[in-house]
Image (tube, helix red, strand yellow):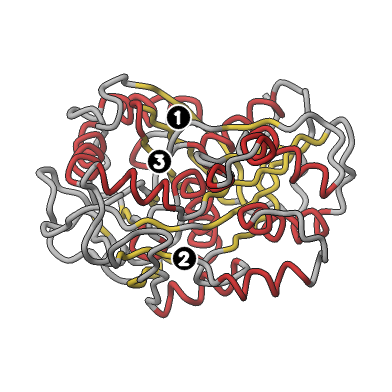
Amino acid sequence: MKEVFITETNCITPLGFDVQSNVEAILRGDSGIQLHEDASLMPMPFYASIINYEKLNSAFEKISTDTKYSRLEKMMILALEPIIKNSEIELNSKTAFILSTTKGNVTALKKDSDDSFNNAHLDVLAKNIADFFGFQTQPIVVSNACVSGILAISVAKRLIQSELYDNAFVIAGDEVSEFVLSGFNAFQAMSDLPCKPYSKNRTGVSLGEATAAVLVSTDATNAKIKVIGDSSINDANHISGPSRTGEGLYRSIQNALKEAQIEADKLDYISAHGTATPFNDEMEAIALNRLGLQNVPINSLKGFYGHTLGASGLLETVMAIESATQNMLFESKGFDEIGVSESINVIQKNDEKNIEFFLKTASGFGGCNTAVIFEKIK
């Protein structure tokens, strides 16, 4: 099978509009989660991580004066533009474009018109982004709840290994909207304080928004990371609740390790999902213990970004790649006292560590679970 690499990365978040500014913010301990009072989004105050509107528009105006793009489309174009430019790859028939999201332009539905209804379709969102850059291939949309961002890397890897493409540009993004906030609030899943993954006194998720972009390629030139194993398993436990035994996540990691041809004890770091809900964090701890991974350093970046839905898996992969290349474990912000029944090794402060292999996991509504294993290029 062809070797597959990640050669370019970028992100647009409340902590910064490039990877370096995000890393610096994390090392300082800054969080994008703030208390917001915006009645157009939610009638009561809420904690979330939201990108500044003026800053976003100002940054977008530097690359385009076109006013037809939605807020999410601007976020996605800003994340993709520098990596397409830096790569100097021709956007021909061997270059795929993969877009990952859960809600896309759902805010378009606030306007009652045929155009607005059309713009809410995910394929229209993907075409708008693809046309901006001039991709020649049919856009591919990955929308599978909150595993979407990391699943998109799996899809890119498999398409390349099937020899359909040589390169794949992947963009993932979601925004905080009235629809998303009301949905999680209806589940009684939103925290009344910034979220605290894996902590005893956690009270739920904080929502966030971001876009992240990577280039997945067969070309090892400038490669940061090799993608060496992946798997997605749906345990079909419940429409919104994860398996109580961690079955889907357990099997996903097990399969990814098998493809990567490494033993569990070779993993140096785990970038986990860690939503700070009682069931998710408990499920992850159970699955990791079943695999003998309870001592591997683990973090959730939700304390910095909130839960960015379809963007989370890719954004957290981008940051995990920085952890590996810089040999630095980032703290799991908000964690204090262990609040899951099984022991896990939550990273409590930034720490130096040689990282050769790392695992990214994600789980989502409908029982979906994805695990991808990466190897640092020496």
State whether residue 163 appears in this view.
Answer: yes
Circle 1 is placed at which residue position? 256
Quadrant location of residue 116?
top right
Secondary structure of residue under mark 3? strand
Circle 3 is placed at which residue position? 361
**Alpha carbon of mark 1 to alpha carbon of mark 2: how far?**
33 Å
**Alpha carbon of mark 2 to alpha carbon of mark 3: how far?**
24 Å
Foreground disc of the pair 2, 3? 2
Image point (30%, 71%), residue name = 349
Circle 2 is placed at which residue position? 50
* Residue 109 position in % (x across, y down): 55, 42
Secondary structure of residue under mark 1? helix
10 Å neighbourhood of mark 2: few (<14), some, or many (≥20)? many
**Alpha carbon of mark 3 to alpha carbon of mark 1: how far?**
10 Å
Q: Earlier in the sequence, mark 2 or mark 3?
A: 2
10 Å neighbourhood of mark 3: few (<14), some, or many (≥20)? many
Quadrant location of residue 54?
bottom right
116 left or right of 135 in image: left
* Residue 44 position in % (x across, y down): 28, 64
State whether residue 350 appears in this view.
Answer: no
Q: Is residue 239 above or below residue 149?
A: above
Image point (17%, 45%), residue name = 278
